């Protein structure tokens, strides 16, 4: 019989092989990220890789603010924009588990003063963007020609964009209503609910809310190479500030600022069943069904990229922040940037492949 010291070495050989494979994947991931930053001219970036409920890589590159040469760090806050909807999805599942919300109930059970055509829309249809509601924003921002109050009055006066449940159509009205439901049922404002029930339990002390107009300490400045319509030479390729507006009543659809490390801790807490049960987690990631019986594009707050042979769900926001979860493979990748148009959701599958091979 082998001595214990040799037996221990033999037993650890698979662990060493796994560690070596991860280190090789990490090396290749760094190269992919740095190449993408150079090719796209991304000023600053955070990324993290989760494998089997452990963060195996977390790094930051570049500048949080170009004009003042402020480096990005692991505590720099990046806006995740529409990826905030994933957190709202978790909040609704938490309220459902607590018996405070029925996802199959009409929104009118929880909110009064709704147009008649809106009253029968189910909560789950708001989450999955199958409500048929008109959008409270257009290409120029809030509709209505005024502030948030005028925008809500304007959108409620519009006809339905589609029959309830007939099709998937992404819009911000859905999540503005969900924020109101959360505040009504939890008896605290939306942002306080998230702080108490997600940021706290998942150890996310830096995460907060705000946009370009808010004074958020340690927040990355957002940039773009989009043309501004001037006559300046090479304007199409000139880096400039990207100003974005996220009104308070729409924070549930896109107002969050956070870090890759804090999103990673949140995803691990989700995976371990610390925020919602694993049964609720699986239900949240199932596509919402249309009236035809076909799958919609989203589950409860999450784009569903793939259901078979292995699931893929995501949070994607502002063409500059994304995370993709591969729950059947124990993998998740987070990439946050401060360049509008970086579209990191296109890069993440290349990174993920390194950890699957």
Image (cartoon, grey):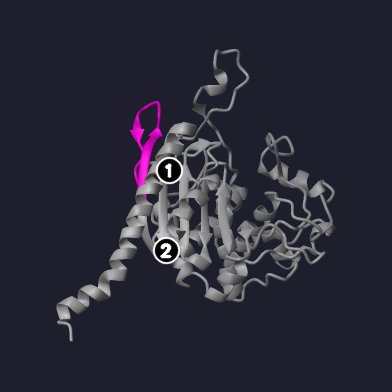
Examine the structure image and report whether residue 71 is included in the region drawn in magenta: yes
Q: Position of residue 18 (x, y in %)?
A: 34, 64
Quadrant in which the C terminus is drawn: bottom left
* Residue at horizontal 17 percent and vertical 76 percent from the top: 6
Q: Earlier in the sequence, mark 1 or mark 2?
A: 1
Q: Position of residue 255 (x, y in %)?
A: 55, 48
Residue 52 sits above or below residue 338 on the image:
below
Q: Can residue 189 be seen in this snapshot?
A: no
Foreground residue, 170 or 101?
A: 170
Left of 67 or right of it: where is 344? Answer: right
In the picture as drawn, the residue positioned furthest to the bottom comes out as 1
Foreground residue, 84 or 20?
A: 20
SS label for mark 1: helix
In the image, the segment drawn in magenta is 58-75
Left of 161 or right of it: where is 246? Answer: left
Q: Which residue is mark 1?
A: 32
Q: Which mark is residue 202?
A: 2
* Residue at horizontal 48 percent and vertical 54 percent from the top: 353
Left of 284 or right of it: where is 200? Answer: left
Q: Position of residue 326 (x, y in %)?
A: 52, 62
Foreground residue, 351 or 318?
A: 351
SS label for mark 2: loop
Q: Can residue 302 be seen in this snapshot?
A: yes
């Amino acid at each position: 019989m082998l001595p214990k010291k040799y037996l221990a070495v033999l037993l650890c050989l698979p662990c060493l092989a796994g560690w070596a494979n991860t280190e090789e994947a990490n090396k290749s991931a760094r190269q992919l990220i740095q190449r993408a930053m150079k090719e796209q001219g991304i000023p600053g970036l955070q990324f993290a890789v989760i494998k089997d409920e452990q963060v195996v890589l977390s790094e930051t590159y570049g500048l949080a603010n170009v004009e003042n040469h402020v480096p990005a760090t692991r505590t720099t806050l990046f806006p995740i924009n529409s990826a905030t909807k994933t957190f709202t999805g978790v909040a609704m599942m938490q309220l459902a588990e607590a018996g405070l919300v029925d996802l199959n109930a009409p929104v009118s059970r929880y909110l009064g003063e709704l147009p008649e055509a809106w009253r029968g829309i189910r909560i789950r249809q708001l989450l999955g963007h199958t409500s048929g509601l008109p959008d409270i924003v257009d290409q120029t921002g809030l509709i209505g020609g005024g502030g948030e109050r005028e925008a809500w009055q304007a959108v409620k006066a519009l006809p339905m964009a589609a029959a309830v449940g007939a099709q998937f159509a992404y819009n911000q009205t859905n999540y503005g209503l969900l924020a109101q439901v959360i505040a009504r049922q939890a008896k605290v404002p939306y942002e306080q609910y998230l702080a108490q029930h997600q940021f706290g339990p998942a150890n996310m002390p830096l995460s907060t809310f705000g946009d370009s107009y808010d004074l958020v300490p340690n927040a990355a400045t957002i940039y773009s190479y989009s043309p501004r319509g001037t006559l300046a030479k090479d304007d199409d390729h000139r880096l400039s500030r990207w100003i974005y507006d996220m009104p308070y009543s729409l924070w549930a659809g896109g107002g969050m600022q956070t870090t890759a490390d804090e999103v990673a801790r949140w995803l691990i807490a989700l995976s371990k069943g610390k925020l919602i049960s694993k049964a609720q987690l699986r239900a949240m990631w199932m596509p919402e069904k249309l009236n035809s019986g076909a799958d919609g594009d989203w589950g409860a707050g999450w784009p569903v990229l793939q259901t078979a042979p292995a699931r893929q769900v995501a949070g994607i926001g502002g063409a500059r922040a994304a995370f993709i979860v591969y729950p059947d493979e124990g993998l998740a990748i987070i990439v946050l940037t401060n360049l509008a148009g970086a579209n990191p959701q296109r890069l993440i599958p290349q990174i993920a492949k390194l950890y699957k091979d």
